[in-house]
């Protein structure tokens, strides 16, 4: 993706930032709200397994991951304002369809459409910021755009709990008035930046192979406990996943405009930041969902009580993101990300060793949640900012899209592994044992993220020639 600056002297900066940061905020908020809503969705559509329900989360993440880069290039081709408006319009319309879904699989299909809209509006909104905000204020505007995700993490659980308490359908209905208001505001305050990029070829085959490969991998993992790991369908799913992912990499290395430019992976900090983003996101997604499932299914918390119980951890994320920036003056990014990953693992282990059948939130759950929130605040912003630090300026937007793509792939893998570990349980003892195994796995993945973080420490980043 290539962004060119076409600054208009008469732009109204505050309304512009509100619109361009507001849309990705709503899309990010959706992640936390839907996690909280999953239990109530299950109650509305009885008879479905946790593996079936996981597609409400995984289907969205798979499509979003695969289309983020090609739809960013598509916005380069047609114009960022047009791409932003179309993406936001589709996200809003799909939200309405999600709220009216008559069955689980209709909901999954409409979630896929939501993901297409989010994958279009996210890079387009960043492109509009870079292309319209005056140079002297651009860095601050981009930081505000990036911070919208942290704000969504802080507010998401509480907002989700309040909405789902009325009905899980409100988790999607709330997007409609917000989306319409943002669309109206965008027509008035967002300038029409003319596309000037030349590298706008779309690797649709690569995106399709990635969707099929990650989708088949997720299918094999989430259905394994229900179908049986020796079932021919599971074998076929894993075989298809391996074949599609191998074909994706082969195609990616030969395409003129690949989803992942091979030259970028020669930049040490970029390659290791992407690996860490994938691994840490797997631990984070599995940890978030496991905590919600424990509160709702074992301690029998309501949606609003679950949201309030989860909120203290995410609230710490933006605070310790700022602390991470201060620590970066004395410590390397890899060290800070490793410390955050280890704190996430430690928080998970503390919950693992504390919780019992009777709810004792303050003593058994809250301490581990707070430690994990500190870890996320230190790790995730550091990983994301380090990913593009060693790239040429002309590739910073593409690099950002790739690292976010790997975050979504990590999310899919984390949720799928959690579903496979939890399986179908009966009674407290069986359920408790399954959660203990799940939390051990999550902690181990957190330690793995700490190990990959060390690779982000590159004293001499490579200079890589990539097309301008």
Image: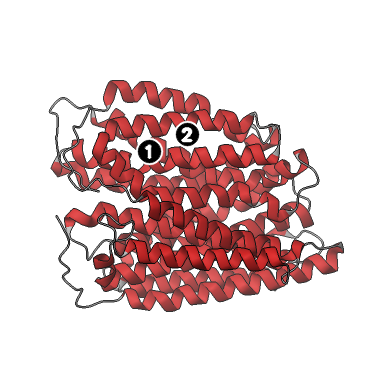
Query: SS class of the residue under badge 2?
Result: helix
Q: Is residue 166 above or below residue 213?
A: above
Sequence-earlier tag: 2 or 1: 2
Residue at (51, 38) in percent of width and height: 113
Res. 91 mark: 2
User: Farthest residue toward the right?
Assistant: 427
Q: Position of residue 285 (x, y in %)?
A: 56, 59
Between 337 and 368, which is closer to the camera in this rendering?
337
Between 133 and 116, which is closer to the camera in this rendering?
116
Q: Position of residue 446 (x, y in %)?
A: 52, 72
Q: Give the crowd class for mark 2: few <14, some 14-19, many >=20 residues within 10 Å.
A: many
Between 297 and 76, which is closer to the camera in this rendering?
76
Q: Is residue 434 above or below residue 172?
A: below
- Residue 352 sits in quarter: bottom right
Res. 427 mark: none
Q: Is mark 2 in CB contact (under 8 Å) with mark 1?
A: yes
Q: Give the crowd class for mark 1: few <14, some 14-19, many >=20 residues within 10 Å.
A: many
Q: Is residue 161 above or below residue 376?
A: above
- Residue 427 sits in quarter: bottom right
Residue at (33, 67) in percent of width and height: 327
Q: Is residue 285 visible?
A: no
Res. 121 mark: 1
Residue at (71, 71) in percent of width and height: 436
104 lies left or right of 429:
left
Q: Position of residue 358 (x, y in %)?
A: 81, 61
Image quarter hosting the C terminus: bottom left
- Residue 354 sits in quarter: bottom right
């Amino acid at each position: 993706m290539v962004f060119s600056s076409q600054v208009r002297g008469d732009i109204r900066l505050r309304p512009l930032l509100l619109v361009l940061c507001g849309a990705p905020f709503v899309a990010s908020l959706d992640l936390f709200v839907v996690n909280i809503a999953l239990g109530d969705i299950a109650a509305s559509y009885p008879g479905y397994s946790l593996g079936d329900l996981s597609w409400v989360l995984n289907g969205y993440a798979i499509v979003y991951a695969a289309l983020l880069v090609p739809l960013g290039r598509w916005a380069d081709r047609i114009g960022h304002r047009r791409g932003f408006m179309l993406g936001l319009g589709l996200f809003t319309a799909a939200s309405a369809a999600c709220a009216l879904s008559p069955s689980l699989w209709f909901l999954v299909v409409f979630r896929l459409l939501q993901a297409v809209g989010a994958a279009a509006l996210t890079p387009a909104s960043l492109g509009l910021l870079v292309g319209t905000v005056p140079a002297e204020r651009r860095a601050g505007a981009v930081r505000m755009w990036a911070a919208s995700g942290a704000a969504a993490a802080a507010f998401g659980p509480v907002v989700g709990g309040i909405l789902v308490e009325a009905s899980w359908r409100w988790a999607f209905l709330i997007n409609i008035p917000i989306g319409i208001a943002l669309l109206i505001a965008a027509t008035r305050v967002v300038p029409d930046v003319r596309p000037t990029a030349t590298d706008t070829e779309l690797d649709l085959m690569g995106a399709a192979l990635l969707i099929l490969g990650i989708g088949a991998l997720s299918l094999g993992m989430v259905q394994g406990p229900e179908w049986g790991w020796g079932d021919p369908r599971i074998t076929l799913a894993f075989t298809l996943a391996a074949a599609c992912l191998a074909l994706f990499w082969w195609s990616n290395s030969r395409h003129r405009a690949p989803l992942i430019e091979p030259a970028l992976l020669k930049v040490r900090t970029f390659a290791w930041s992407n690996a860490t983003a994938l691994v840490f996101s797997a631990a984070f997604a599995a940890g978030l969902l496991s905590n919600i499932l424990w509160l709702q299914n074992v301690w029998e918390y309501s949606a609003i009580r679950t949201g309030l119980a989860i909120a203290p951890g995410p609230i710490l994320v933006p605070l310790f993101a700022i602390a991470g920036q201060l620590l970066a003056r004395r410590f390397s990014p890899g060290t800070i990300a490793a410390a955050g990953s280890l704190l996430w693992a430690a928080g998970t282990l503390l919950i693992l060793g504390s919780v019992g059948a009777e709810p004792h939130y303050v003593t058994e759950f809250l301490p581990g949640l707070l430690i994990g929130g500190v870890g996320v605040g230190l790790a995730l912003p550091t990983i994301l900012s380090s990913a593009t630090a060693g790239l040429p300026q002309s590739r910073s937007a593409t690099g950002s899209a790739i690292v976010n793509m790997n975050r979504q792939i990590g999310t899919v893998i984390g949720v799928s592994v959690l579903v496979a570990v939890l399986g179908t349980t009966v009674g407290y003892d069986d359920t408790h044992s399954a959660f203990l195994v799940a939390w051990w796995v999550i902690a181990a993945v957190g330690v793995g993220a700490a190990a990959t973080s060390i690779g982000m420490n590159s004293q001499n980043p490579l200079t890589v020639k990539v097309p301008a």
